[in-house]
Amino acid sequence: MRLTLVQPPNGFLDYYDLAPPLGLLTLAAVVRQDGVVPALLDLNLRGMQDPTLFGDEFHERTVEMILETTPDVVGFTSMALESHVCLELARLLKERRPELVTVFGGPHFSSIARQTLEYYPWTDYVVTGEGERAIRGLVRHLRGEAEPPTNVCFRRDGEIVLRRELKTIEGLDEEVPFAAYDLVDLDEYFALNPLRLLNFDSGRGCIFRCSFCYSPGFWGQGEQVRSPGGVAEDVTRLHAMGARHLFFVQDNLVNSVANTLELCTALIEADTGMTWNAYTTMQRLTPELLDPLAAAGCTEVFVGVDAVSTEAQAAFGKHFFKGWSSLRKRLTDCLDRGIVPTCAFMVDVPQDGDHANTDAVLTTALLTRNLGCGIRLNTLTVYNDTITEKQFAGHPRHYSELKPRLLLDTPPAVYRNEYAREHPELFPFHSTLLDLPVYERFATAMHLAYTLFTSFQRTLLQYVVTDGQSPWLLLERIADLVGDLVPVPARERRQLERTVFEREFRELTVSTRTREAFELESAELTLSLSPPGADVQVLSAGERRWYTPEPYEVIRLSEPLATLSRDDGAARVEKPGNYLVLREGGQLRYFLVNDELVGELNRIGQAGTGRAAVELSAGALSDLTTAGVLKPMKEVR
């Protein structure tokens, strides 16, 4: 028996998360133990290697790729965003080869198992929950050796049958084999993602029960973990295979402080040389745990702050946020140890002109960003078979491509979903509970928010904290000016938003602190897009030499630079100075410089190839070369 496992595409612009699909490679290792010959087709990798794959002939080309593996069974997985891609590929495969067996799994298909078989006759089986035992039992059933196993949904005599159990794996060390990485060429992934990233399964599940989350229904409440020694052994093995960074995929790595400490101890003692990141919960991020996490190689954590307002906390059953000062302490403790948090926020939709809750979450996200953390601004996705979905039972859903198309930057094969037009309730990324005009306005504002919170975080913070303005009203105003982003090519949208914002913000009456933050960040943006400067000839101490200037700007601030990221609206600290902002090697650097050196910089800026040499004092030339403003050319021109 030959089994081909298919990873559908979900993005094509961001390579940061690109890694071989761990779940499918683990299932491949499982079925191989039963004599099955597995193959893998990762459409994320294929599409990033050849972007033309995502054109109008995507489905036809992909079907050919699958058939080239000569499968007897084809298995698809989905987290929800791309489940319709799996359904369409399976339909086309059945047209070509009706005898093919199609199998579906992953969190989303697990949550809509019965509906999948009811609505789509070309689907044969749906694996629900953990897949290892289920896929092994299904393989044996297909060979006529056993009845369909628990956690496999199938048709029998016109009825849809499913015997569902949670936590079927008794021990991860014993029942979950090392992933079948021999099925992929790791160098192909590492060539696209210089992080040399692999995903890693050190445990499963979460002890919490947030109402919007798939985890409790998929894994079952609570957690299962691998032995710390087994984890350290596999991490060492992955490092030897060329990986240098791991993403620990467990829903919450720090369910148990005791278990996490044992894991860190094993990794420290193994001295694997690997860095890694993981999902965590904020109340666990205390110095007692952060110190061993950092020592064990943890460099980033993903924290689901999610609910900020009291109403959102009650709706989602998530009461972790206890105010900014508490969150700030947790995040600062992480940053002090070299662990960078990324915080996810569920943004409240303004209701009947009331945007207080929306402003509260946006302000908290701004504070977080200015602290030096990453942020994600999320709109509610109502996943199937969750508490949140049950709370909204009976509410109509409306088809929309806006989230996958605009907020997630997916290719056409992903953002177009004809299946969701007929059953929007089955496809959470392609439907909304909001009226479409409200949703479209809100989604556009959220795309704009992420752009501006990344490029103008100091400006917006001071606008909110010092000037006392509403972040939502500003976003709404700029969104109206930006207009419909859908026709704009994905790679051009954020630049358009920044341009419109800069033009509009210059016309606003704001405080000096806010204005200076804006001028600084506008200069930083200019530098990030500037080409290298023209070569200049410098005469100093009687010697002529050619130099290449790095892009730079000089901004005069009436307060110390750090003040612009202050989160308390404190009184001004009068300490004016000239700040040299220099782009070097893709990074921005900052220097406080005197008026005399500013004059020298102005003269360099006015010079260019073919002009007379710029005369600099030996001291000024030394300062500018030491700072990196001027790079000596290797050959005299």
Image (cartoon, grey):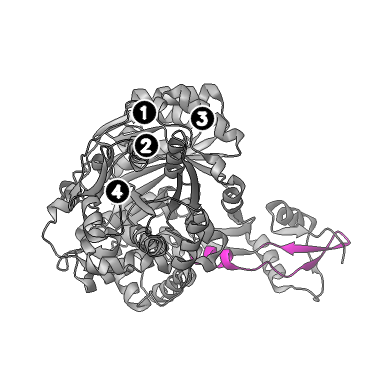
Kindly indicate whether the residue at mark 3 contacts the one at mark 1 (C-beta within 8 angstroms).
Answer: no
Q: Earlier in the sequence, mark 4 or mark 3?
A: 4
Q: Which of the two discs, 4 and 2, labels the residue nearer the N terminus?
A: 4
* Three-letter code, disc 3: Asp
Dot placed on the residue nearer the N-terminal end, 1 or 3: 1
Classed neighbour count for the residue bearing mark 2: other residues with Cα under 10 Å, few (<14), some (14–19), many (≥20): some
Tag 4's secondary structure? Answer: strand
Mark 4, mark 1: which one is toward the viewer?
4
- Pointer 3 and pointer 2: residues touching (CB < 8 Å)? no
In magenta stretch: residue 583: no
* Residue designated by label 3: 234
- In the rendered image, residue 548 lying in the magenta stretch gets the answer yes
Question: What residue is pinned by disc 4?
Answer: 126
Q: In the rendered structure, are the residues bearing label 2 and label 1 in contact, judged by CB atoms less than 8 Å apart? A: no
Q: Which residue is mark 2?
A: 136
N-terminal label among 2 and 1: 2
Residue receiving disc 1: 225
Would you place residue 190 above or below residue 467 in this image? above
Q: CA distance from mark 4 to mark 3?
A: 30 Å
Identity, as a three-letter code, of the amino acid under mark 4: Val
Residue 463 vs residue 487, the one in the foreground: 487
User: Secondary structure beneath disc 1?
Assistant: strand
Q: Secondary structure at mark 3?
A: helix
Between circles 4 and 3, the one closer to the viewer is 4
Residue range of the region highlighted in magenta in the rendering? 522-550
Vertical side of 194 occupied by 225: above or below: above
